[in-house]
Image: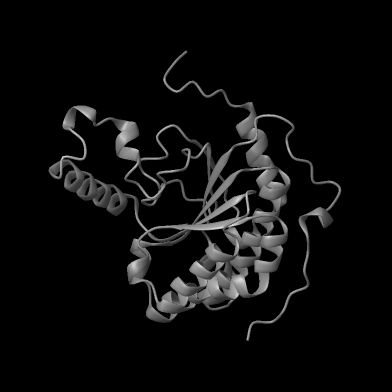
Amino acid sequence: MAMKIPFINHKQTKESFHCPEHETPEHIAIVMDGNGRWARKRGLPRVAGHKEGVSAVVKMVRSAVKCKVKILTLYTFSTENWKRPKPEVDSILRLPKEFLHIYLPELISNNVRIEAIGDMRNLPEHTREAIQYGIDRTRDNDGLQLNFALNYGGRSEILNAMKDMFTDMKESKFSLDELDEEHFSKYLYTADLPDPDLLIRTGGEKRLSNFLLWQLAYTEFWFTDVLWPDFSEKEFLQALEEYRQRKRRYGGI
């Protein structure tokens, strides 16, 4: 059984934590990179880095709640991550259950609503059950929406959306003349969500890694060398402050 960690409400964070007063992103997406390297630097197995990464998830959820972010989407497990050694994959896919076992009461208290995007069919039953339990328990919350991207791949999402769309078109549910970007977006996992305003990627890499390829068309990117387990409120606020200073033109002047 997972070790209990004392309940900490976001109201108990340090007084020095100040969110930007204006231009807070509505939707933030995060590529949580660097868990394995964090562990290797300390002579630990990679799975230790993934477990430590859960602490960073908790910190970011608390920070997002305090800064009144509406949607936080975390790249938790990609379609490519199945290529990793089976013990590592098994460990990663146990983390949602361990995370919710400890922190679900806090998420409920902070009015967080849990959702998931990705192809859930190939995930282990214990992972699917844990996520569904979290979704069910937080369904009526209307604060921060916390999206776990599990068995998610941007290319497969687009291909699956196209298959569903063509099926509907064959069944005369709509005509080709009606097809536009807005209509196509309704077939994506994120159909009911606004596109991310800000993408944060930790760990020093500067690529999308097949994450939200359609949705990130006009998203602001922020990269840091900090490995995910070390990512703190300090870096989160740096990202928000830089976002606040940018001018989003969407192709205009």
Q: Nearer the viewer, residue 92 or 116?
A: 116
Tell me the residue at 73%/47% (across/down).
66
Left or right: 170 with respect to 91? left
Q: Nearer the viewer, residue 105 or 56?
A: 105
Tell me the residue at 66%/61% (across/down).
58
Give the residue furthest to the right: 15
The quadrant holding residue 150 is bottom left
The quadrant holding residue 101 is bottom right
Give the residue furthest to the bottom: 1
Where is residue 196? Give x, y as percent: 50, 40
Above or below residue 97? Residue 166 is above
Above or below residue 191? Residue 97 is below
Q: Nearer the viewer, residue 223 or 117?
A: 117
Where is residue 79? Give x, y as percent: 34, 62
Tell me the residue at 50%/68% (across/down).
131
Above or below residue 71? Residue 120 is below
The quadrant holding residue 48 is bottom right
User: How many marks do you count on the picture?
Assistant: 0
Where is residue 14? Give x, y as percent: 84, 52
Where is residue 163? Give x, y as percent: 20, 50
Where is the N terminus found, in terms of image quarters?
bottom right
Give the residue furthest to the top: 253
